[in-house]
Amino acid sequence: MTSHAQESTISGDAAVGDPERLHRRLGRADLRTVSEVRRAIRELLLHWGKPERTDVAELLTSEIVTNALVHTDDDAVLTATLREHRLRVEVRDFVGRRPTPRVPHADDGTGGRGLLLVQSLADAWGVRTQDGGKAVWFELDGFEPDGFQPDGFQPGGFQPGGFEPGGGLA
């Protein structure tokens, strides 16, 4: 197993409209990076609430990273961007062959389920051809920064059109 130098950066400040971004080069066939990328995604989403969405983001990220490392014989690049309550994760590799979801058979062990998971759990996903390779991506909605208050929220009072304290409708 060959390991290449890896670079990883997290940048941005979503509080001022700048997307938070994770960018990481993944070494060829280095499956140790899968757990490292899961931790980096968790760190990126640390202050964005909804732990169940973070769990799904980690799972889907590990699936597309593993696919890129197992089914190609080259490096890959992961980019994750968090903007406007949406996470987009993209893994770019340098092999033009497009992945296809397939129905796993009982004798496949644990293999063959990655893209089916992505297809089932992501709000959007796809594959695009890019400069002699491809990018596999998915998006998840529903991320909100800690302390986020939707428009019209009134702390300690009732929300127009909602329930009044004491049980009556507004």
Image (cartoon, grey):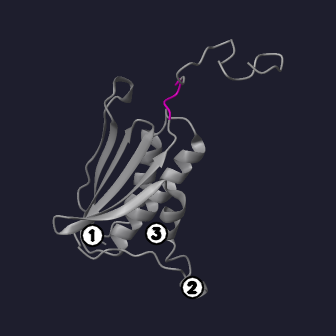
Residue 61 visible, this angle: no
Mark 1 or 2, nearer chain start: 1
Q: Amino acid at mark 1?
A: Thr
Q: Which residues are magenta?
A: 144-148
Distance Cα–Cα, label 2 vs label 3: 14 Å
Q: Dividing the image into 4 quarters, which one contains the N terminus?
A: bottom left
From the viewer's side, name the closer residue of 114 and 69: 114
Q: Amino acid at mark 2?
A: His
Numbered label attached to residue 130 = none
Residue 44 image point, x, y percent: 42, 40
The residue nearer to you, when weighing 111 against 130, is 130
Q: Nearer the viewer, residue 97 or 76?
A: 97
Tell me the SS state at disc 1. Answer: loop
State the mark number for residue 115: 3
Along the polypeptide, which appears first: circle 1 or circle 3? 1
Residue at x-position 29% and y-position 51%: 24
Q: Is residue 155 above or below residue 129?
A: above
Residue that numbered label 1 is attached to: 2
Side of 100 relative to 52 (left or right): left
Question: What label sits on residue 105 in the rendered view?
Answer: 2
